[in-house]
Image: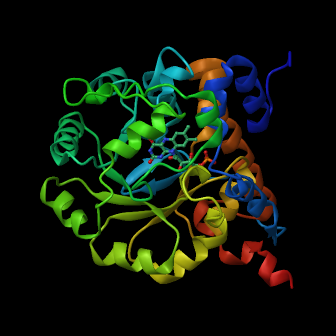
Amino acid sequence: MASEPVNVNEFQELARLALPKMYYDFYSGGAEDQHTLKENVEAFRRITFRPRVLLDVSRIDLSTTVLGYKISAPIIIAPTAMHKLANPDGEVATARAAASCNTIMVLSFSSSCTIEEVAASCNAIRFYQLYVYKQRHIAATLVQRAERNGFKALVLTADTPRLGRREADIKNKMIAPQLKNLEGLFSTKVSSDTGSILEAFANQTMDASLSWKDVEWLKSITNLPILIKGVLTREDAIKAVEVGVAGIIVSNHGARQLDYSPATISVLEEVVHAVKGRVPILMDGGVRRGTDVFKAMALGAQAVLIGRPVIYGLAAKGEYGVKRVFEMLKDEFELTMALSGCPSVKHITRNHVRTERERL
Ligand code: FNR
């Protein structure tokens, strides 16, 4: 592909050409049959628009706020592991792109640059994503480091008591993780005779006993607002509100955990109805077009997160690639707003979309 990519899917193709197969498979793959992986994208396609016309859309304002932070568009960077496998500058390049796009970056617990390196690299608004290992002191130390380094919120990923079965990683014998923040705290050396070293590592370290009461523990060790990532049901959404989280991220971990989980866009409304506006709701999974951003907003999300698109941009063209991916989605979203008659994100309503259920 000689010309500049014009959409996120073309960036994916460039990333495939740029990366060793093991890494491309790691980034792009999902769990088991990859049913949910396909559904995350397909479910967006089944939603259509109810566009309104003859409204003044000569000026479009895409900006919004998340936890009080103003961002240029309701698109933020999801936490994804080990960006140095995609580009030598790793998460520093991603953070710089986030800063220049004026959006939020959620740094993964499994990052390949340290909390300190990312903080020193730019002034992007940063949230920190947390996994909790059996050795609880590791989480406590990382939370303190995130606080000291100006991170504004914690994202507790709740859908990973164990790692989902990603068959490509097993076949490729996916390498041991390069978890920079854990250096000196914990040995990441592990071996596996049977396949994915990553899976063996995660399953030996993750605290599968983590439960709702541990959110209290987390609140006792930090003053940062806590978002829960990985909610897919009304029951868990209500639980999250009850334990006092600052926000909920509807997510199935990019279809990398429980295959046959529902597509996130298909359960967003269930969560929105259960929460009744008490906390903001974000979503991720399968966002590849500005039209997808609009659909998520119409169904009640305050913003979306993008995972793989960022990695594809990073792998294909480094910091510039991440910026381009963001700008493409932003431009597409702006056009969708104009063609739907919405001059600002506040104008996007439930009536602007029609779901499959409503067509029957
Ligand atoms: C992830 N995701 C993830 N989530 C998390 O909480 N901590 C992590 O370290 C990771 N790592 C990770 C690595 C890779 C390669 C992918 C693709 C995903 C999940 C991520 O935050 C997000 O939920 C999904 O990526 C969203 O789906 P899309 O945008 O990739 O379709």
Quarter assignment of residue 39: bottom right
Locate residue 136 relative to residue 302 in the image: left or right.
Answer: left
Q: In the displayed structure, would residue 174 be above or below residue 47?
A: above
Q: Which residue is drawn at 47% across and 48% down?
A: 163
Horizontal and vertical percent position of residue 19:
66, 20
Q: Residue at x 78, y 28 (%)?
A: 13
Q: In the displayed structure, would residue 337 be above or below residue 179?
A: below
- Can residue 109 be seen here? yes
Quadrant where the C terminus sits is: bottom right
Quarter assignment of residue 139: top left
Q: Nearer the viewer, residue 1 or 16?
A: 16
Q: In the displayed structure, would residue 36 be above or below residue 235?
A: above
- Can residue 313 be seen here? no
According to the image, what is the colour scheme of the structure?
rainbow
Q: Residue at x 23, y 70 (%)?
A: 213
Horizontal and vertical percent position of residue 225:
27, 57
Q: Nearer the viewer, residue 274 or 150?
A: 274
Q: How many labels does the image show?
A: 0
Horizontal and vertical percent position of residue 285:
61, 53
Locate residue 24 relative to residue 146 in the image: left or right.
Answer: right
Q: Residue at x 37, y 57 (%)?
A: 67
Horizontal and vertical percent position of residue 319:
55, 22
